Amino acid sequence: MVKSPSFGGASEAPARTPPQAVQPSPSLSTFFGDAAASHSLASDFFDSFTTSAFVSVSNPGAGSPAPASPPPVSVPGTEGRPEPAAMRGPQAAAPPASPEPFAHIQAVFAGSDDPFATALSMSEMDRRNDAWLPGEATRGVLRAVAAQQRGAVFVDKENLTMPGLRFDNIQGDAVKDLMLRFLGEKAAAKRQVLNADSVEQSFVGLKQLISCRNWRAAVDLCGRLLTAHGQGYGKSGLPTSHTTDSLQLWFVRLALLVKLGLFQNAEMEFEPFGNLDQPDLYYEYYPHVYPGRRGSMVPFSMRILHAELQQYLGNPQESLDRLHRVKTVCSKILANLEQGLAEDGAMSSVTQEGRQASVRLWRSRLGRVMYSMANCLLLMKDYVLAVEAYHAVIKYYPEQEPQLLSGIGRISLQIGDIKTAEKYFQDVEKVTQKLDGLQGKIMVLMNRAFLHLGQNNFAEAHRFFTEILRMDPTNAVANNNAAVCLLYLGKLKDSLRQLEAMVQQDPRHYLHESVLFNLTTMYELESSRSMQKKQALLEAVAGKEGDSFNTQCLKLA
């Protein structure tokens, strides 16, 4: 089993397993962020994140929130309700009229012929990021809404999106539970982590929880904010309306659930969203709230998450099918742009610079979909097609060619094809010769070390890992693997010293599940006092990690 300190997800650790040589995984998802912006941990969970505080426009189906739930934070003058199209069908309900203050705002922006209002609502960046091609049925509904802004357009209830929380609260702290069990109440009382009550009830507080790795508390806070929006517990299947903020909150909550390994929970809450193509997920469905704005409210990353989730539930073929549908839309949008049209195929007056930016964005998104398809094929152990897909990704991310070729080489190592791995690593060396800087040299040395690991030549592998550490003493992958090499060379004490020194040097950086799993395994091999040493690690974890920490790596349970 291959692990990497870059992993943040939960992993199952067998009770008695030899220490694991740590390799950077073929997963290269960190390369698909926005290169123009520096990313914190929190940014992994946000897509097209709004810069404002949480702004909630109340929903027709929103009841009074429970007393414990915070009220929505709104901008003065926007305390109203979007006016969705009416519905028909079983239990169809017409939306109530807008409250008076919001009606005044609607009157101001109701006309689509106001160029200022249109420009205000539909910036160039919005158009580029929100573009999507709806299905034929959805397109028909949106056209009807556009043609009858002042009349009612009836939509079958089953064709609308009516989500709600499916479970109330999963907040918990496994680290504190272990401290109570092994160290007592006094020690456990010292464990202080942020929770949903101790941060601002907004996107700001949400980012704070995620940055501190308190992901369970962040799930809880998402639930509170969605409850304030009228999409809380027990609201699934009830009429509602959507905003950019509510869709962003759903994406963050679902991404956190997947990150925590709660796949069944994520699937239950994803179910009301269907294929993410219902008409009420488009801006055009709310012409009075988003005058002139077009496209989908659904973050692009939410579409990827929706597709990828099925592979974690044992349905990789369904994941591939969903990814293929996303790829088809991305390819069509890219073809429209390259023909001088707008993303949706209409005539466009976009500047050349704007068109180039759109092409770059959609090429990047298409590459991201191809990458997810490659990962899915790898999970299915269809190595030939997976490698072909990774090669296709290089077309969209040429600047990541060395990393992708290294990943393909390491896949070959995992399946025991040493010669093919060596060929790919040689290709990496040719590519990195054209590059300056430390990272290219480290990549070459790391590949050589892994090649020797694959040949069970631990002494040579250790030599290369040590050389990397001379160039970059903070390299966790090299440090961990060097320690594992020492173990296989029969130098258990030296191996333990190296890992312990690494953890003590920078606990915030090195208290990672993979490192700790190897360390606790070595304690079991080295001493009958392994339980006391594991408990000391538990105390160290308690002072640094949030509620999402995977305690299985400590092997205390």
Image (cartoon, rainbow, N blue to C red):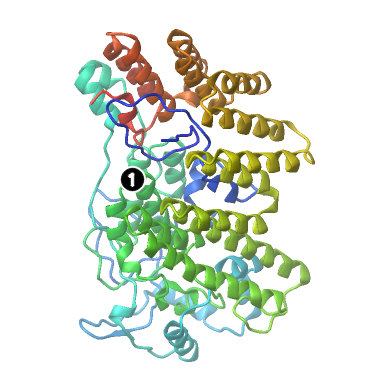
The x, y position of residue 81, in whole percent, is 38, 71
Q: How many marks?
A: 1
Judging depth in this view, the residue of 467 and 438 nearest the camera is 467
Who is closer to the viewer here, 102 or 483?
Answer: 483
- Where residue 84 sits, quadrant-wise, is bottom left
Is 30 drawn above or below residue 100 in the view shown?
Answer: above
Residue 116 visible somewhere in the drawing: no
- Nearer to us in this view, 93 or 281: 281
Residue 59 position, x and y percent, is 34, 69
Q: Quadrant of the C terminus?
A: top left
Q: Does 39 sit left or right of 375 as displayed?
A: right
Q: Nearer the viewer, residue 455 or 60?
A: 455
In this picture, residue 55 sits left or right of residue 344: left
Dot 1: element: loop
Q: Position of residue 398 (x, y in %)?
A: 69, 53
Going by the image, does 92 lie left or right of 304? left
- Which residue is pictured at 58% across the width and 51% down the height? 32
Residue 196 place in picture, x, y as percent = 33, 41
Q: Which residue is mark 1?
A: 261
Q: Residue at x 43, y 43 (%)?
A: 205
Tell me: 41 left or right of 155: right
Q: Quadrant of the N terminus?
A: top left
Disc 1 marks a residue whose amino acid type is Gly
